[in-house]
Image (tube, coloured by chain):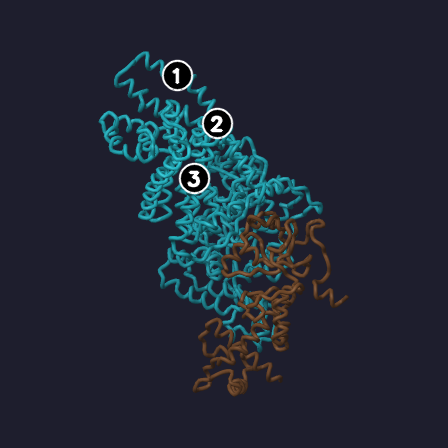
Amino acid sequence: MNNPGNIEIKRKIAVAGLPNTGKTLIFNGLTGDYNLVANCPFTTINIKNMPFSIDGDNDIEQYELIDTPGIFRFNTYSRSEMVTRDLLLFDSPDMIIQCIDAAQLKQSLSLTIDLLDLNIPLIICLNAIDETVRKGIVINSQRLSAILKVPVVESVATTGQGLDELKNAIRATFINYNKSLTTAPRNHYESSRTSAAPVSHHDLSRISTTLGNHNDLSRISTTLGNHNDSSRVSTTHRSHHDLSRTSAETMTHHNSSNVSSLSHIHTDYEDGISAIYSLFPENLSHKRVWAFLLMMNDPFVLSGLERLYPKEEIEPVISKAESIRKHFKGNIGLEINKKRNRWIDDVVEKVVRRQKLELEDFSQKVAGICRHPFWGVPVLFAIVYVMFLLVVHVANNIAAWMESHLWVPVEELVVSFLPTGFWHDFLIGDYGVLSLGVANAVITVLPILSVFFIMFNTLEDIGYIPNLTVLTRRLFQKVGLSGASVMPLVLGFGCKTMATMTTKSLQSPREKFIAIYLIAFAIPCAAQMGLNMSILGRMGTTAFLIVFSVLFVVEVTAGLLLNLLLEKEDQCLFIQELPRIRMPEPKAVLVKTWYKLYWFLKESLPVFIYAALALFTLDRVGVLDASKIFLSPVIEGFLGLPLEMVDALILCMARHEAAAGLIMNLIAARKLDFVQCIVAVTITTMFIPCFANIMAMIHELKFKSALGMAIIINVSSFLIAGLLNWVLLKIFV
Amino acid sequence: MNKKREREEYLEVLWRIKEDGIEDPDYLKNAFGSDFEPTIIEDLEQAGHILTGDNGSIVTLTDAGYEYARKIIRAHRIAEKLICDALGGDFESGACEFEHILNTDLVDSICVLLGHPRRCPHGKPIPQGDCCKTAARTVQSPVMPLTELESGMSGRVAFINYSDDMQIYKMDTLKIKPGGMIKLLQKSPSFVVSCEGGDVALDDAVASNILLWKEGGQFNAGGENMLGPGKCRRKRGFGFMRRKSA
């Protein structure tokens, strides 16, 4: 636009940051789009691109915004963090906005160092600044900006405060950057030669001078943009130590005059980084980051480099890095961390002021009760019970009202025109497009989901659900799950598809397999849970208790069995960051519920209609009856269910929610009694996971294992339901 | 020049060559540069600590030599740990002096005092002593595992035992690191600590490997200067130091 004749490529801006720092909130705020947000780490699993524009004084700037999954630091084990790292390293966005939870500044600054190393313009967005104020922490953001030499914007992403400032900062940063480019024309994402990038180099070397800790920091910055490493080394390494005895080496200093004779004993990692710097292929971008990753012995660094260059070309760098690591006195990773931490502590000390008085922390108290070994359990049960009551008494009444006020008139209208015959059946028969398709989705399922989602989203907004990991960890440990896999399982109660995808972050294939299996098996997702509550509510609290106890026992048994069957391996440790408990934001909860319902209707309504059509066709052709006769020994004999349940099971394959409506109809028609109802709900909960979940399983496992898993799950759900039927009949009849 | 001491220095380098799998035959020579003394190699060979090759260049440790070197390395790294953690000072030069003075019993008692650290401040493994195998404990130990802190109390991390670098990196990103303050919120059913404004859940295995200074802990230069009000008693020095001065 500004340069006619040039093809304008939209500039890409990536939003990155630690998990649960409000990246998606900022993304939603800037683009006006809506993506799921929650007070929970790893809500975003995939990268999302979206165009957005900023109104300027006399023009509109177009950009492309990229939302990324949370990342702690570049050096990582976790595949979900790798998604973000690959994006930043390979696709080099034109700008990065780092979201920082202001209350956890120190944690975020490690990532800031990594991002500064990229030499890409950076804006820091200090999020949740309202909560830090409440906690009595004051962050001097201007000072932070002066130290880091990047713009720092304060924001409260949940309410949208600070978005305008952020937009201004984006514009201003690009304008400043372009100015600096005109003085030294050069393509900035080619950081290969760039390391000598005028802007960033200059900026970063100033970081060091502003900070007291000159010695360490000049290292962090100098090598960043430095080709003449040797000359720098001698100036920064001022101290001379007697190296005639190796034991007199110190960790931070060494005698530069002895470098030649001791070239293979590195005592400072910066020497290592400089040493491998020059060995990289000339046109490699982000050399410093790659050098850093090689020094840290990062598990994915080799595959990353091999994506860019043939093996032979990078071989010398890798062997050099290996030898440096080997001959480094001490653990090079710890050394790097230690230096970074010193820098971070220094920065934080300069910009953060705390009130001496520790305020009574309400959120800590609530969190403490939720995670309490004794009170945590009653709190959990109370929450579930309240949800149950609300679904049964509020949602079912809304559904009944909608039925009589919305559905009955339609039904009467159709009957008045088409009293009987094909079209009557086609529209409002047992398998009618309107009755089983539209009314089932909109009138039966939608009210239940609305009520349930409002409550569930409130819990998510409060940050309650991740805290359950604390309560449930011991249990999960018994079924062979440790550490990182607790979180995906807990998330399974929200959405099983999403939970399956978060298993990406598990390193151990064994745990991943167990976790995916258990998520797919007896855990009801939020929608299923709501509908189960509604169905079982018609039979009373006892039915509800029985079903959930059975599902619980099944899940634990399945876990124990898998744990026994699969080969043992070292358990990874449980280190799980927890989100802060906060007051729910009613607007955010309602918006989220609205979108979830909107997506449900958008995705499911067609599925409901197609499923109804399919059943209608099968029924007309006679296949349905034939299959019912064929399946009757299993359904009627083994499971003790009426034959109509075959329809429900078929609908289940299309969409679990669709089966719920049919079961409710059967209850209304008194075709399901207490025991049958329990068996029906149990089997539909365990039966074939929804399509999206199966796709996620295939994505995370190999096709064969995913398919095998689905088959085992289905067979065992039939067996368990049959067994349950037998037991219940013994007890209740 | 103290011959015993020089011999020990050579054994130490030979241990490191073995530990790091260094294949460079001239490593030993280079390490000492112009101070390299072939006579010390001869002395060591006579003492039965090392074996030399035909041309005298290739040197390996004998079993006896290995044991001797192990003791020196252990003393050195334990000393480093003591000086680094307790005094936060330049541990390297002090440790070098220490290793030649400390006898096995003394090293073991410092090891007990420090709670049997497994790695020196550089991250190198500390060879185990008899005290580690029996997991001996004394009440005087200035550090204690996080598992022994009372809920609601804060403590400063002295060091963290770990088996895998990535584990320590992960904790580092959450700012659970030597010198940092953490507050224990609860112990059961999982450990939950508050650190730098974030809450982190840990299992028992991780918690028992986080070692804290028992009281106050103003020895380490961390960034955090503030302690919770009244949550943490500040006293100068730790156990054995106070007793000495009293």
User: 10 Å neighbourhood of mark 2: few (<14), some, or many (≥20)?
Assistant: many
Where does residue B128 sit, x and y in percent of width and height? Answer: 55, 70
N-term-proximal mark, 2 vs 1: 2
What is the quadrant of residue A617 in the picture? top left
Task: Identify the residue at the far right of this view.
Answer: B246
Image: B202 above or below B74: above
Quarter of the image holding residue B237?
A: bottom right
Identify the chain of the residue marked 2, using the numbered disc in the image: A
Do dots 2 and 1 share one subunit?
yes
Q: Which residue is mark 3?
A: A551
Picture quarter containing residue B220?
A: bottom right
Q: CA distance from mark 2 to mark 3?
A: 20 Å
What amino acid is at disc 1?
A: Val
Q: Residue furthest top?
A: A416
Q: Taking A552 as reference, is A419 above or below it?
A: above
Q: Secondary structure beneath disc 1?
A: helix
Callout 3–callout 1 Cβ contact below 8 Å = no
For residue A333, above or below residue B109: above
Q: Earlier in the sequence, mark 2 or mark 3?
A: 2
* Residue A392 badge: 2
Of badges 3 and 1, the one in the foreground is 3
Chain painted cyan: A
* Kind of element beneath mark 2: helix
Of residues A621 and A442, the one drawn nearer to the viewer in this rendering: A621
Chain whose colour in the figure is brown: B
> Disc 3 on helix, strand or loop?
helix
Share a chain, discs 3 and 1? yes
Looking at the figure, which quarter contains the N terminus of chain B?
A: bottom right
Query: What residue type is disc 2 on?
Result: Val
| Tag 1 residue | A408
